[in-house]
Amino acid sequence: MTTVEKLKKILVEDLNLQELSPGDIDENAPLFGEGLGLDSLDAVELIVIIQKRFGIEIQNLDEGKAAFQSVHTLASYIEGRLSGG
Amino acid sequence: MRSTDTAEIRRESRSWSARSIGSRWQHRFFYALIRLAGRRAAYVMVVFVSMYYVLFRPSVRARSRPYLSRRFPGRNALLRLRDSFRITVEIGKVLVDRAALGILGPGQLTVRHGRREDLLERIREGRGLILVTAHAGCWQFAMESLRVLETPVSLLLHREEGDVDLHVFEHRGNDAAFRIIDPAGPLGGALEMLQVLKHGEVLCIMGDRAMGGERSAVEVEFLGGRVRVPVTPYQLASATGAPVVVIFPYKSGPGNYSLQVEKVLRVPEGLGRDPEAYRPHAEAFIRALEGFVEERPYQFFNFFDMWNQEPMR
């Protein structure tokens, strides 16, 4: 399973997005706002989930802001961090 | 954070105002008076200025009316005028104290920390500490006084553009005793708030002002009506395991303040993203606030019609 697929599954299951299935999520759509429609409460949950599931702690605000643009950017960020980037 | 959430915070911030009712020159006059004649002279001036505002500026009375009419239902016109005058004088004195603290230094005021050991014990748990407070007393002074905890303090605060009323640290031109996290910032400040708690530091959030989308708050009963209360502090506690302490700062005498620790809330971990899961904790906070306004009715400075927000869908 690719990181993008894992993330989609996590978003649906851990954030309990009952109205969606992983296949419905456009990996390039914005996570917050008009795309997936997540909000600030979800941001807290998502940051904690990423830490628990991938062991990644996002410390830099600019990095975090860039990473949380879409599923695609978040997956790239996670892969970069896991490969020591 | 949703761009609509950010817009919501900015819109709500415009629909009420924490901005001072005074103009820039009026503030400068008071700052000069404090420098030249001291805090007590400024208190006297506050009485006259408050009288003017309450008698000749209906908009000032209107700002405190939603709260006062619920706290003191059935008052006649004269008593309502007196209530409005009292609360205007009280906030005026608090603003003088705040300016005096910044201009003349910390020796001007004293603060008594009830149950300081309690707070230190919670910090020693190592999971950070979430302080939930309200627009009571001089919350900025309370933040300053948290230096005694010897732990960095951050405050979730949306600063209004163009506010001429200076923060304590802005008078002194030095660093704040606390760091400000803007909820209208990236990801609603979520990343910064989580980092604060991760580092075992103190995060302070106003529990009586809901900002952001409808999912960021629940409706609870307060003084006989429904108000929106934020769930962010309790959700953060659930996500991190940090204890929540409800505190209310209040002016306990001329030049004296107290920081009242009301209660410690433990939020079960992993409650998730449903705001309803946090209703019992939001209720607990509001019950504590009701007790506070019962005891100190003229120290609650939420000049905002909490009971007349758009209903949650």
Image (cartoon, grey):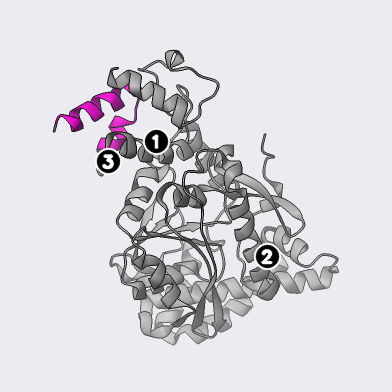
Q: Position of residue B281 (x, y in %)?
A: 58, 54
Q: Which residues are magenta?
A: A63-83
Give the label, 3 or 2, closer to the camera. Answer: 3
Identify the residue at image location x=47%, y=23%. Answer: A34
Asked whether residue B97 is drawn in magenta, I would say: no
> What residue do we see at 62% from left, 59% from top?
B284
Which one is in front in this view, the residue at disc 1 or the one at disc 2?
1
Q: Which residue is mark 3?
A: A58
Q: Is residue B251 left or right of residue A76?
A: right
Residue B68 percent coordinates (x, y): 73, 64
Q: Which mark is residue B290?
A: 2
Tag 3: amino acid? Ile
Asked if residue B226 is positioned above or below residue A64 in the image, the reply reads below
Quarter occupied by the C terminus of chain B: top right
**Answer yes or no: do the residues labelled 1 and 2 have beta carbons within 8 Å?**
no
- What is the three-letter code of the residue carrying label 2? Glu
Circle 3 chain: A
Residue contact at pointers 3 and 1, CB within 8 angstroms: no
Of the pair B37 and B264, the residue shown nearer to us: B264
Asked if residue B206 is positioned above or below residue A85 in the image, the reply reads below
